[in-house]
Image (tube, grey):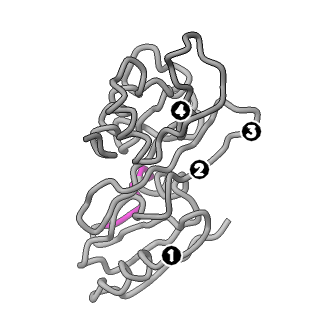
Amino acid sequence: MQNLESLFKSFETGIRSVKATKPKDYLNKIGLDYAELRIGFNSGQFHHNKSQGVKDDFEALGVLKKSDAGVRKEDLTAYTVFGRYGLIFPLLSKKNEIVNYFALRFDLDAPKEEYLNSEGIYPAYPNPLTKRLYIVPTVIDCASLMQSKALENRDAVIALHDGALLPQHLEAIKTLHELEEIIIIKR
C-alpha cells in the first residue's frame, strides 16, 4: 500500500535529479533551498509504469483522479495528478506523519497553490516547550522564515491553511503550556 510518506520520498529524489533544473531555478528565485527544507518535486509521472493496484492506492490517497483525457493505448487510463509539475511540501500530523501536501505549481502562467486535503500542519506541530509562536499566512512564508535562521531556540512557526486557522492549529496551540507570545504575520 502506497502512503504519502513513501511518495514524498520519491518527490525528494525528484528535486535532486539532474533533470530538475526548472524547479531548482524557481526555488532559487524565491530564496528556498531544498537541501535545508523538506521540499520535493512532482514531475507528474510517479504513477507511470506502475501496476493498477498501485495506481488504485494513489487514487485512494487523492493524488490521482481518473480523467477523460485521451490516451495512446485503449487499455490505459488517463489520470489527473495532484500538484503536477510542482514543488511539494509535506504537512504533518501530531504523530509527525505526512497527512497532506501543499503544492506550488510554478510552471503555469500564474503560479498556483493547492492542498491535497485539509489535514496536518506545516511544517509540523510545534514542540510543547515552545515559548514564542509565529503564525504566518502561507507555507512559502513559513519555509522562508524557517530558512532565514531568525527563529531562536524555543521559537516555532506554523502556516495557516489557505489563510485559515483550522481546528488542528488551535489544538496545537493549546498544547504549548510554556507559550509566552504569539506573533501573527500578515501580508
Q: Amino acid at mark 4?
A: Asn
* Left or right of 5, for residue 101: right
x, y percentage for residue 187?
68, 65
Real-space CA distance between mark 4 and mark 2, rounded to the nearest whole angstrom: 21 Å
Label 4 belongs to which residue? 28
Real-space CA distance between mark 1 and mark 2, rounded to the nearest whole angstrom: 16 Å
x, y percentage for residue 105?
60, 38
Residue contact at pointers 4 and 2, CB within 8 angstroms: no
Q: Amino acid at mark 1?
A: Leu
* Left or right of 100, for residue 128: left
Which one is in front in this view, the residue at disc 4 or the one at disc 3? 3
Local crowd size for mark 3, using a 10 Å CA cut-off: few (<14), some (14–19), many (≥20):
few
Q: Residue at x 51, y 55 (%)?
A: 139
Q: Secondary structure at mark 1?
A: loop
Which one is in front in this view, the residue at disc 2 or the one at disc 3? 2
Farthest residue, direction front: 74
Real-space CA distance between mark 4 and mark 3, rounded to the nearest whole angstrom: 18 Å
x, y percentage for residue 22?
56, 22
Which one is in front in this view, the residue at disc 1 or the one at disc 4? 1
Which one is in front in this view, the residue at disc 1 or the one at disc 3? 1
Q: Secondary structure at mark 3?
A: loop
Local crowd size for mark 4, using a 10 Å CA cut-off: few (<14), some (14–19), many (≥20):
few
Residue 67 vertical placement versus 125 (above, below): above
- Tell me which label, 1 or 3, sits earlier in the chain: 3
- Tell me which label, 4 or 3, sits earlier in the chain: 4
Farthest residue, direction top: 72
Label 3 belongs to which residue? 110
- Tell me which label, 1 or 4, sits earlier in the chain: 4
- Say which mark, if any, is on residue 166: 1
Label 2 belongs to which residue? 114
Task: Say whether residue 149 is magenta.
Answer: yes
